[in-house]
Image: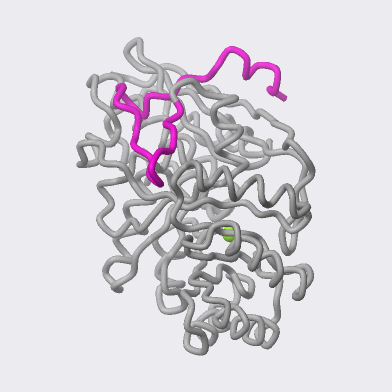
Amino acid sequence: MRIERVSAAAYKVPTATPEEDGTFDWDATTAVIVHVEAGGEVGAGWTYSGTAAVTVITDLLCDVLIGRDHREITALWEDMRRACRNVGIAGLVMQAISAVDIALWDLAGRCLGAPVHELLGDAGRPVDIYGSGGFTNLTPAQLTEQVDAWKAAGCRAMKIKIGRDDDRDLERINQVHRRAPGAALMVDANGAYTRGHARRMGHLLDELGVTWFEEPVSSDDVKGLALLRSALRCDVAAGEYVSDAYGAAALVGAVDCLQLDGTRCGGYTGFRAAAAVAGAHGLDVSAHCSPALHASLAAVGNLRNIEWFVDHARLEPMLWVGVPAAADGRVAPNAAPGHGLRLRPEAEEYRL
Ligand SMILES: [Mg+2]
């Protein structure tokens, strides 16, 4: 079927309380949502981005899509990328392309009456999740509340933000361990440290049994990540800003597990390509955020787990009908055609 219509809009959802990590603070999350129509069916996709991603879709991507066969997903992916060459592809533009790619996969599934996970090559196996949040500005009581929610969801690993205050961060890690003694401990510094500070902090994290140290330095400091990977026992992880397979290739020597975000690295198409690059270097990948979308990716053989990020686990059911629930530390994709998610009418209240 020919693509007849493409629409995009931004939705801004306030967080429950102000949130903070090692290098950033925020009080709302913006989702840019795209709908693609063909043959009487509508596919939906989204990215967590800025309102400028709406302009990228309407100004640069619509012309590529309208009138084309909706089944040509990989050809459309390449053509969208080509159409944006002169404005730069990494970051914002690839976030817009990601939202469209996800909508195209959803549309393809709906036209065939098949779920996306089946189109990608899996029968719908659940994927391990890990609890994630633990913002640096949470009170001890708020952190306990998050840990308890992850325990209730069966999470066997939990990740908190660090990077503002070493002593307090170490105490917060101990708090998680006391509250969930069997859980693997993970931390994310969001690039807050210099190389030396990260090495010193990393040795303390090793002593506490932390298994995952995410973005100890900026993920742009690839050599710094590689040096820390050699110096520390815990896994060093990064990759949430990777835009494509080239970005994945740049990080493979510097991390123990490559993070990928399908809403930033080219949708399901880009995720699979980047995961294959990691696999060819003996690495697992871990899906960053957007659990409702990543739940469809069990066919990616080297997918270690999905981040059950507290912000997105809260807001995805506010915007969408059909969001898969976590159970026994795993999430299984929706069995309905496409990814099975439909925008709620109530989402209108958050539309910008
Ligand atoms: Mg991170």
Please identify the dominant SS of the magenta region.
Answer: loop
| Camera-nearest residue between 339 and 38 | 339
In the picture as drawn, the residue positioned furthest to the top comes out as: 40
Is 351 magenta? The answer is yes
Q: Residue at x 59, y 50 (%)?
A: 147
| Camera-nearest residue between 103 and 202 | 202
Residue 339: x %, y % from top left:
37, 29
Q: Residue at x 38, y 40 (%)?
A: 331
Magenta stretch, residue numbers: 323-352
Residue 93: x %, y % from top left:
56, 46
| Total number of numbered discs in the rendering | 0
Residue 157: x %, y % from top left:
47, 58
Q: Quadrant of the C terminus?
A: top right
Residue 349 image-quadrant placement: top right
> In the drawing, does residue 230 fall left or right of residue 311?
left
Residue 340 image-quadrant placement: top left
Q: Quadrant of ligand 1?
A: bottom right
> In the drawing, does residue 153 fall left or right of residue 137?
left
| Camera-nearest residue between 51 and 27 | 27
Q: Residue at x 76, y 52 (%)?
A: 138
Q: Quadrant of the N terminus?
A: top left
Residue 303: x %, y % from top left:
33, 56
Residue 309 seen in this snapshot: yes
Q: Residue at x 60, y 63 (%)?
A: 178
> In the drawing, does residue 318 fall left or right of residue 165?
left
Is 331 magenta? The answer is yes
Residue 265 seen in this snapshot: no
